[in-house]
Amino acid sequence: MIDLRQKRICVTGGAGFLGSHLVEKLRARGCEQIFVPLIEEYDLTTERDIIRMYRDARPEIVIHLAALVGGIGANRMHPGSFYYKNLIMGAMLIEHARLVGLEKFVALGTICAYPKYTPVPFKEEVLWNGYPEETNAPYGIAKKGMLVQLQGYRQEYGMNGIFLLPVNLYGPRDNFDPETSHVIPALIKKCVEARERGDDHIVCWGTGRATREFLYVEDAAEGIILATERYDGAEPVNLGAGFEIAIKDLAELIARLTGFRGRIEWDPSKPDGQPRRCLDTTKAERLFGFKAKTPFEEGLGKTIAWYEEARRAGKVR
């Protein structure tokens, strides 16, 4: 087990949604030597800035969270960008970790890496049993490339790198930009704005029949820290909450929690994305003691409360 309090830790994406919660938890654990490369100072898609980041931070551990992400719409509009930027960031960060003799590299993958028709619950062993869902395949494959690289570097160079597969995250500080947000913040924003305008209905993408699993962001941060401390294996490990909910039921739940009382209409001309998503989370509990703790409705309530307060304060649109 690694004592993280004694380590110099670099968290890419540490100023973002998941990263900000992770950095807070690391500090609460007593970690004082945390380096967060801000996008304004380090472009992690360029080798020059990656070299400079390693030189400035002198990390012993890198936790790589930085990514170009978005919902179905953003993935459909920018498949090339999502593939290239995520692939090149991961590949160069891992290569230069090898060159500087990094003690441990922690890579965050994505549930989008799983095959489109994966049997539920998703087990890590079936990760390569088919092509990902088409709308987010470029993103999923780019992130999956880090697993191949880490396993290859472990075999050839003895490098310690681990690969975690988180399910869809949600929580306070999420991205509520309608162009790039994921389903929970998009639905919260839609319902809150419709409630305030007095609209009698909202329109949502797809049929509502697809299912998703969601992990509260603070639980995800805890899982990453536990894996960093306790797991040194070559095989990927899921991070999830172990349940699934239909998007139709999710929309109705968010409408109730936000106080929107109008109709919910569905636009089947828009894609549903992957038909079902739900992870087998037994390996994370067995290997490093992680189990999600936040009840889903409680987490949604906290997310909605944060959004409404941030909106009143002018911090989000």
Image (cartoon, grey):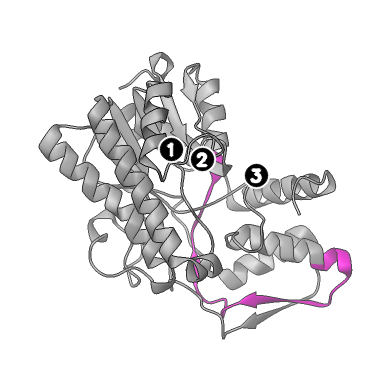
Asked if residue 230 is positioned above or below residue 130 in the image, the reply reads: above
Asked if residue 204 is positioned above or below residue 259 in the image, the reply reads: below
Q: Amino acid at mark 3?
A: Arg
Q: Amino acid at mark 1?
A: Gly
Rate crowding at label 2 as few (under 14), some (14 to 19) or many (20 or more) other CA atoms within 10 Å: many
Residue labelled with disc 2: 219
Q: Position of residue 309 (x, y in %)?
A: 80, 45
Rate crowding at label 3 as few (under 14), some (14 to 19) or many (20 or more) other CA atoms within 10 Å: some
- Residue that protrudes farthest toward the left in the picture: 156
Q: Position of residue 90 (x, y in %)?
A: 34, 45
Q: Amino acid at mark 2?
A: Asp
- Mark 1 or 3: in front is 3
- Which residue lies at the image location 63% right of the left edge and 64% below the top edge? 179
Counting residues from the start of the chain, the first of labels 1 and 3 encountered is: 3
Tell whether position 208 is magenta.
yes
Q: Left or right? Give the position of 182 relative to 190.
A: left
Q: Magenta span covers which residues?
A: 194-219
- Residue that protrudes farthest toward the bottom in the picture: 269
Asked if residue 130 is positioned above or below residue 29 in the image, the reply reads: below
Q: Left or right? Give the position of 192 relative to 17.
A: right
Residue labelled with disc 3: 173
Residue labelled with disc 1: 223
Q: How many marks?
A: 3
